[in-house]
Amino acid sequence: MERVTVPPPMSLLAELTHRCPLQCPYCSNPLVLDPRVGELSTVEWCRVLDEAADLGVLQVHFSGGEPMARKDLPELVGHAVRRGLYTNLITSGVLMDEAALVRLAEAGLDHVQLSFQDVEVVSAERIGGMKGAQAKKIAAARLIVADGMPLTLNFVIHRLNVERIPAMFALAEELGARRVEIAHTQYYGWGLKNRATLLPTRAQLEQSERDVAAARARFGTWMAIDFVTPDYYADEPKPCMGGWGRRFLNVAPSGRVLPCHAAETIPGVVFPTVREETLAGIWNDSALFGMFRGTDWMPEPCRSCHRKEEDWGGCRCQALALTGRADAADPVCQRSPDRAVVDAALREVDDTGGNLAYRRVSGIK
Ligand code: FES
């Protein structure tokens, strides 16, 4: 297969740690979490940030786990800022206090994306698995807005909270957030494990679309609203990550470099690491990033589809999770020979409020 050359990545997702005080049952981290021992050191992360800037990356998203569990976060933010990178902190907010925010602001942090599990406290704390989390999040949001730092509230939507989307917008308005993400859960990793409990019905999805449309009409340009729908109800796949190896790099806590957060589920693959190779070498030349880049790898019906350079074949990790083959057509596509597995999942929605499997990783210090 011919090597496909692409421009530099736009964004680096720096997963500083998998440690997190929360245990959300749709967490995007892998089912097997990286332990604290083995996390990249401060010096190693600074080298990764240097290599990202040299490669042409524009934005770095500090994520986790909970990135604030890393005491060197302000140092890493400062380093990224000095290298000209736009810095975004993706956090649960439960470790945020005034002193921590001051350190981050002094380091030059550009933006915070704060996650909420729900607006209703009992439900939020059931989903996150942490008592007292909601009050800490609200306090964090107030500190961030008072500081003048741009704030996005992120709500992950599923069957157990989908009816409270209007209240989520009301909370965002009250807190002064100017951007809100209403993002339906995506079903791989932990989300897939809990799919029967989390997947909304079609009627709930359609109501969520009306709720978002009403909020857009009400807030106009005052509030930017991003809406992510669940793939399973779509007829055509999304261009996952903007296409494999086209726009994003993920660096996992132990230094593995991935085209997306779920790529580690792909069997028989050597995962490159920043401990052995440069980011530029991995981006341009690794077998992993070349694996599904472009269109040459595509099977039918993708290969002859007019949308193949719009959706880039959809999500490889979803194809793997649902068909056992990472190079299969994304089964959410109506033209996929495997679409029946998605339709079967839609019929298996669990109405009982169900048991949730929680991710756990010990030690947040
Ligand atoms: Fe890996 Fe979509 S999450 S390609």
Image: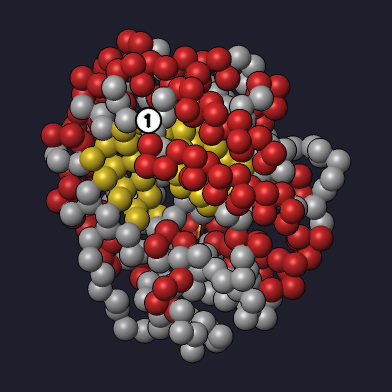
> Can you tell which quarter of the image residue 202 is in?
bottom right
23 relative to 64 in the view: left or right: right
Looking at the picture, does residue 351 appear above or below residue 137?
below
Amino acid type of disc 1? Leu
346 relative to 26 in the view: left or right: right
Residue found at the far top of this picture:
99
72 relative to 169 in the view: left or right: left
In this rendered view, identify the residue nearer to me: 139 or 273: 139
Instruction: Name the quarter where the C terminus is drawn.
Output: top left
Q: Residue at x 54, y 49 (%)?
A: 213
Q: Residue 204, position in %: x, y?
A: 71, 49
Q: Residue 153, position in %: x, y?
A: 46, 33
Q: Is mark 1 within 8 Å of ligand 1?
A: no
Q: Residue at x 67, y 41 (%)?
A: 162
Q: Residue at x 42, y 59 (%)?
A: 241
In this rendered view, identify the residue nearer to me: 43 or 25: 25
Q: Is residue 121 visible?
A: yes
Looking at the picture, does residue 240 appear above or below residue 127?
below
Q: Which residue is mark 1?
A: 151
Instruction: Name the quarter where the N terminus is drawn.
Output: bottom left
> Can you tell which quarter of the image residue 69 is in?
top left
Q: Report crowding for label 1: few under 14, some 14 to 19, many 20 or more residues within 10 A (C-alpha).
A: many
